[in-house]
Amino acid sequence: MPGPSLSESQPSATGPTPPRSPVPTPGRSPVPTAPSSPVPAAGPASPGSRASSAAGISAPTAPPAIGNGSRRRELGRPAAFAALAAVFVLFMAASSAPSPLYVVYQQQWHFSATTLTTVFAVYVLGMIAALLVLGALSDHLGRRPVLLFATALEAVSMVLFLTAPDVTVLLAARLVQGIATGAAMTALGAALGDLNPAHAPHRAGVVTGAAPAFGLGLGSLGCGVLVEYGPHPTRLVYLLILAGLVVAGAVLLALPETSLRRPGAARSLLPRLRIAPHLRADLAGLVPILVASWALGGLYLSLGPSVAAGLFGLSSHVVGGLVVTLLTGPAFVTALALRGWPAPRTLALGASLLLVGTAVALVGVEEHSLVTAALGTVIAGVGFGGSSLAGFATLARIAAPAERGELLSVAFVISYLSFSVPAVIAGTAATHAGLHETAVVYAATVAALAALALLAQWLRAHRTPEPRTCPQS
């Protein structure tokens, strides 16, 4: 985590820092501030609040409330931004860390592939529930309280992992972790948008788009190395993450608050999904690529290590972690490299490479060629990154500011359901039909969805000409 540079407590609104003022008296409104600069659209692993910050476009911010005349040392804005990016990576790494351990748990507790994918899916369902219920809470309570709550809940999940004697506690740990991650993602996305530097308007969007892929790859590969070469394979990684969460909590206590408390917190907990009628056709055109890319990600994070061990005879836990990294690593690099491309071109490239990569990986599975399967995974990872970046950028651009939050909430739910439900179905099929047949059918389905996504983008481009602009901006 970046070294914090502390400064005296300051208001955190975007724009010039006003001089320190006395504690406002009750009933007097705070001095208004200028809205922050626009931020490029974020990727799906990183929604902000249920408002426009989910799209990577920051909402106007206000100075923090000052209570009791006390002065608290806070991180400066650049250090706070860097710290939030590191916390984002930590949460994502924690979410993928159990993936290489699924095979270990399965050997110890003798459960089926159906149970294995259920453990994975419970995490995603908890995250979806948190996105729907807690998505707007930081707009009412402030970013720091929600982030501290999410960090504490994540620490609880690590304790459950450490003490899990059976699959029941493992399920509970993943559910708690999903809720914590969903709550953190919304507040992290909003806070990064609030603190986005004016001289680098793309920075928050790049971080929120690339950090999830980087964290997922880091967590799975790091855990695989620790399981293979470190002591206590089912304990050590959780102890390290727990230590990181303690440090993160201490840093978050020094985070400058960027959102004033306002009424309506209880009302914001009511889940709400709605799409404006004029946006439904555009969302429908993006559904195939959202489903294809995130269903592929779900397959790799749930059954990827099992496929490596069962079909290719690779028992090393490092390889189990590397399977996930081969998909998420290229996705991370792609999100950085293509952030300036027009969304239609990026979507076409993403869907094409997702189709080609999945087909190549399928050939590798059929021919039992490890090199071919790995190459296909890398190609599909590039397609995954490009599809996620441009898909959510398109949704952010076509919606008016008052519609972005609702539209992106629906898109996030579609993405994460695609991430989990097909993986559970695949786990059930693997139990009854076998791992090889399941992997072949799953990959063929993803390839067909990618082809459908290409067709949908072609029809959409001919129906409504796209402006020659860079929507990621």
Image: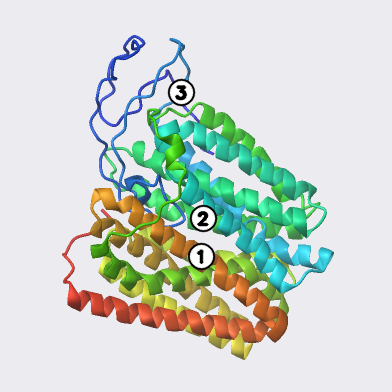
Query: Can residue 259 be seen in this snapshot?
Result: yes
Give coordinates of residue 278: x percent, y percent: 23, 64
> 26 left or right of 384?
left
> 223 left or right of 32?
right
- Indicate whether 169 appears above or below 72: below
**Which quadrant does the N terminus fall into?**
top right
Q: Quadrant of residue 461?
A: bottom left
Give yes or no for contact between labels 3 and 1 (Cβ–Cβ under 8 Å). no
Question: Mark 2 = which residue?
Answer: 128
> 40 left or right of 373?
left
Question: Mark 3 = which residue?
Answer: 74
Give yes or no for contact between labels 2 and 1 (Cβ–Cβ under 8 Å). yes
Give coordinates of residue 473: x percent, y percent: 25, 53
Give coordinates of residue 20: x percent, y percent: 32, 13
Kind of element beneath mark 1: helix
- Residue at x-position 60% and y-position 81%: 439
Furthest toward the bottom, the residue is 367
Give coordinates of residue 138: x percent, y percent: 44, 37
Marking on residue 417: 1
